Image (spheres, grey):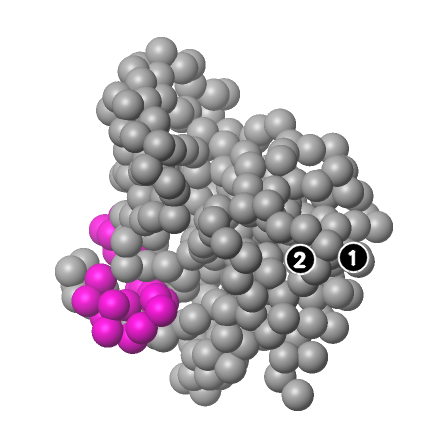
Amino acid sequence: MSLLSYLKPKGKNGFGYGSTAKEVTEGISLNGKTFLLTGCNSGIGKETLRVLKLRGANIIGSARTKQKAEEALNEIGGGLGLEIELSNPSSIIKSTEEIKKQNIKLDGIICNAGIMALPNLEKSFGYELQFFTNHIGHFLFVTNLLDSLQENCRVVVLSSAAHFIAPKEGIDFDNLKAEKYYSPWTFYGQSKFANLVFAKELARKFQGTNKLSFAVHPGVIKTNLSRHFNPILNLLYSLTEPIFLKSIPQGAATSTYLATNKLLSNDSGSYFSDVNKARERPDANSIEIGKKLWEVSERIIKECIK
């Protein structure tokens, strides 16, 4: 545990920066419930998987290959492994159709997978890869499963405090293909802002039901997400880890809490960090941005699956 884990106070719910996924689910039974998680094979995704299974849940886990998903699931006692490449709509549709074909009803979806700060511009279907993978992929993934959600389902979307470094517009809809400029961190921030806005717009669409949607900043953790960092940044990560960085069990705490805790019905659409509601960019609540992002996302998907 880092030094900050001991110094930072807990929130109103008794949990905080140093809480782990196991601690925030203590006493909760998930017997008979089914959870679906992207990016299940490493980092906080794998820990989330482990704790949900520990509490009795049925698990569906996805990774970029079916083999990686199944290997992670076998380590925790089994589950359904899926191959989902979030930058490939065909892969997403194939796996979500498999879930619907088996008539599986979901109590929770955790959109955990992602990529971060790609040093060079990469694209999928002509669109900047971080936006396409982190947002468009999860947008298609969730919306294609809306009919498979139980009445009390939770959708948890991993955003990031990096949403604060998104462009001043939040989402630069005129530069989603990065034809005007590209910046690794700005575009990562944009994708995480999109994750946050998507969770909020989904919560609006869930109004009148018992379905809930949340966005999460898991914390700063050294995981595979940092694989694209340059040597200097990786050195800084290593040097600051004992002071500031969360452990993987701590990083999995907030999303696991939101997926399982019963006392959150009034918080749908909220942004959480350290297992408590957190400050966010004010424009993330813009209904106009939310509607436009939803419409643009649907249009992009139609372009890609012609």
Residue 134 versus residue 53: which sits nearer the camera? 134
Residue 51 versus residue 75: which sits nearer the camera? 75
The residue where tag 1 is placed is 174
63 within the magenta span: yes
Q: Is residue 73 above or below residue 223?
A: below
In the image, what residue occupies the spot 77% across and 42% down? 169
Q: Is residue 74 above or below residue 166?
A: below
Task: Locate residue 171, reporting x and y percent.
Answer: 72, 49
**Residue 303 in view of the camera:** yes
Magenta-drawn segment: 48-72
In the image, what residue occupies the spot 35% across and 69% down? 64
Task: Locate residue 25, reporting x and y percent.
Answer: 33, 40
In the image, what residue occupies the spot 45% across and 87% down? 101
In the image, what residue occupies the spot 46% across and 25% down? 13
Q: Is residue 174 left or right of residue 145?
A: right
163 within the magenta span: no
Name the disc covering residue 178, or none. 2
Task: Locate residue 109, reporting x and y percent.
Answer: 47, 59
Total labels drawn: 2
